[in-house]
Amino acid sequence: MLTRGHLTLLVVLAAVLAPALPSHAFPYVAKRGDTLATLSLRFYGRVDREKILVTANGVEGAVALMPGMRLEIPTVSYHRVSQGETWETLADHYLGDAKRAEALALANETMPWLPVETGREVVVPYVLRVIAGPGDSTPSLAYSFLGHRDDAYVVDRFNSLKGRALKSGDVLLLPVTDLALTDEGADAAREGLALHAGEAAGDARDAQVRADAELPFLTREVREGRWIAAISRGSQLVGAGPLSDPQAGRVHRLLLEAYVALDEHDLARSACEEWRRADPESPLDPIELSPKILRACAGLAGGVRYGTIGDDSAAPPSSAAPVAPSAARPARPSESP
């Protein structure tokens, strides 16, 4: 029968022998009076995250820590998506297997068959190594570490168990996402020199989540001709943090329409340039866009006027445009030149 001491030893051995994954944690040096329960409350705002600290460090819970003891405090990390990246490539890099794309997508409240947006900041779960004990099952581990028994399928698929019952001593990897830090936790992380993206880690994702919620309201304001309200909302979204390319394209396209309506020519021109930079494949269609919008977008850097980027051959229809001599109808012999 496995004793608590045996389980602790197995945790340590698993950490040494299992393949390394780029999970994120920051170091913390214990002070007099610290326990894992008090650190859980201070750093996560929740006492129940003590189990994460116990498992990540292979130490006993509910006892005072030795001053000077070095601990690893797990956190999530963040990644800003580059062009061409997919849930599969990100899962392969961060979670050790492209087949874990589902867990990564679910951690970001989407599905793996939906494309990940270029420029989107995604949260990367902390991969926690767990040793199954007597009586452990995928539902019990899901409840203990992921928060819900219904996440048992995540444990099963992440570890390719295919429904197999657990045995004592099985080494499992669990993608833990619910590890948001308190302000005190963020300060400790900075002191530990461990936040992957520095002080602003997660700010881009917060801005992008907000943009998802605000874009329908911005669209409605533009449709209803509430230009000032639209410009205020759009400017706040742009200033809140880096948006994904599709989000930036939509915001600047809507700002372009509002600026054009108010005859703010310079601002409209800048909005069009930002729109085309974020969404270069969107055509400047003279049928769908007003002449004022087309004029605001004319002559952008790179010679872009009409059509998609790189296509400057088309010209907008205009009843007042003169007919080029080469295209004029040749005069008949009976007509005067």
Image (cartoon, helix red, strand yellow):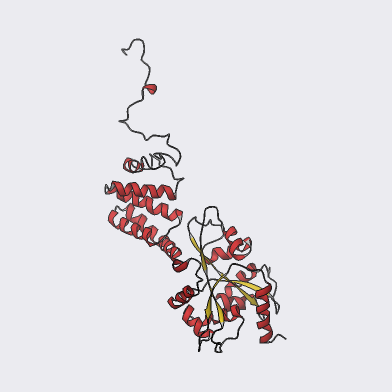
Compare residues 331 and 281 and report the one nearer the observer: 281
Residue 67 x/y as whole percent:
54, 87
Compare residues 273 and 167 and report the one nearer the observer: 273
Q: Which image quadrant: the N terminus? A: bottom right
Question: In the picture, residue 19 is in which quadrant?
Answer: bottom right
Q: Which image quadrant: the C terminus? A: top left
Pick out the residue farthest to the front: 68
Residue 227 x/y as whole percent:
29, 53
The image shows residue 209, relative to residue 132, as above or below, that is above
Pick out the residue farthest to the top: 334
Residue at figure coordinates x 45%, y 46% from the top left: 280
Question: In the picture, residue 17 is in which quadrant?
Answer: bottom right
The image shows residue 106, relative to residue 299, as above or below, that is below
> Would you say 215 lies left or right of 82 here?
left
Compare residues 83 and 227 and report the one nearer the observer: 83
Compare residues 1 and 59 and report the one nearer the observer: 59
Residue at figure coordinates x 64%, y 67% from the top left: 157
Q: How many marks?
A: 0
Residue at figure coordinates x 29%, y 58% from the top left: 229
Residue 277 x/y as whole percent:
43, 48
> Would you say 40 lies left or right of 222 here?
right
Residue 239 x/y as whole percent:
36, 60
The image shows residue 8, relative to residue 82, as above or below, that is below
Question: In the picture, residue 334 is in which quadrant?
Answer: top left
